[in-house]
Image: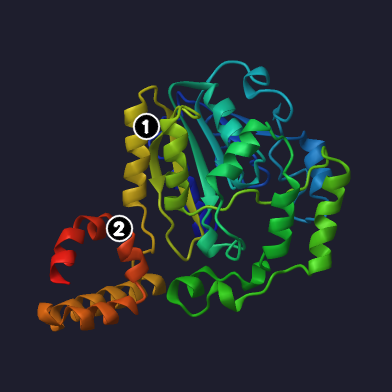
Amino acid sequence: MPEIFRKRQAALRRGIDFSRARCLEIGALTTPVLTREECQVLYADRVDTEGLLRQFAWDPGVTPDNLAPVDVVWLDRPLKDCVDGSFDLIVASHVGEHVPDLIGWLAEASEVLSAEGEIRLMLPDARFSFDALRPPTRLADLLVAWMQKRRTPDARDILDFALNKVRDSEVRCQDFYEGVSAPGDMTAQFSFEEALDWVRPALSDPSHYVDVHCWVFTPRHLAELMIPLARNNVLDLACAGFEDTAPPGFEFGVFFRVEPDVRRRVESWERMVREAADPLPGSAAARQKEVELAEESRVLQDESPLDSSHWRERLRGLPGMTRLRQSAAWRYTAPVRRRLR
């Protein structure tokens, strides 16, 4: 078993009493996190087993012998209408980024959770995946998909994916982490015309399903998006924990539980924002940030307050000053800086 899968399995299974838990795994395909030998689990997907075999006919690794049999087809109906009873654990590994309406999908999953149940997702970190060239998901995009109750990917999501997807062989997570290569060194896998070909079937038939990454996240970015959703009662889910990205891996885990109290669920996502490492310790980005902060500190210490015009000019050119000017500390110290002018 590959090391990355062992870590994924450990994170998604942590603290669960499988002798008692009733579980649902979504999108298990050929690598289920949960097995029937160890727990009571149902496997769910958007199509049945035969449909998956047709969908992945191009992949020699997907065969009737190693595909987890689909017990629950969850496509056009709410999940609660597709299953009986509730579940103590719902897991989905590298599924959430494919879901056309992530908000609605999470809401439907939460409807079949037991009182103490959790939804546990493993998602790709865009900084270390073939989504590295794509812009992060916007709150507006999530909300529009939810308001439209999408069951198939939007044409814009398909096109953005096809225009910017990096060839798998060029995604070397450890190289990104160490600064040996960067997203700017890579090129998109598909040509411009090939990308247009990806989206044409969906434009002619809105029910046509194209399997793409609809959403682009990092751990901190996902938590930031969850705060307004939790605060405005779009989702009543709190952060029950998360597993930060740890290269050479390229994924992170985030766990959800139902929380009726708005303040508590907002605080849980704010806590994840604070705790998620961005940039990751020891990475090239973290080293660059340390250099920038050290230079800013040196300038502030070396220049006399009486020579304020000189150090103001030097500060303007430092790489981290835009971020500093947008911070709360910059606003709070404005009166002091005005007196020094």
Indicate whether 188 appears above or below 301: above
Q: Which residue is mark 2?
A: 327
Q: Earlier in the sequence, mark 1 or mark 2?
A: 1
Badge 1 marks a residue whose secondary structure is: helix
Residue sitting nearer the eye, 132 or 160: 160
Q: Which residue is painted at 30% across and 65% down in the image?
A: 324
Q: Quadrant of residue 226?
A: top left
Q: Position of residue 263 (x, y in %)?
A: 32, 29
Q: Quadrant of residue 34?
A: top right
Count of labels in the image: 2
Badge 2 marks a residue whose secondary structure is: loop
Q: Position of residue 108 (x, y in %)?
A: 59, 26
Q: Which residue is painted at 62% across and 16% down in the image?
A: 84
Q: Which residue is mark 1?
A: 265
Indicate whether 134 appears above or below 10: below
Q: Is residue 121 left or right of residue 11?
A: right
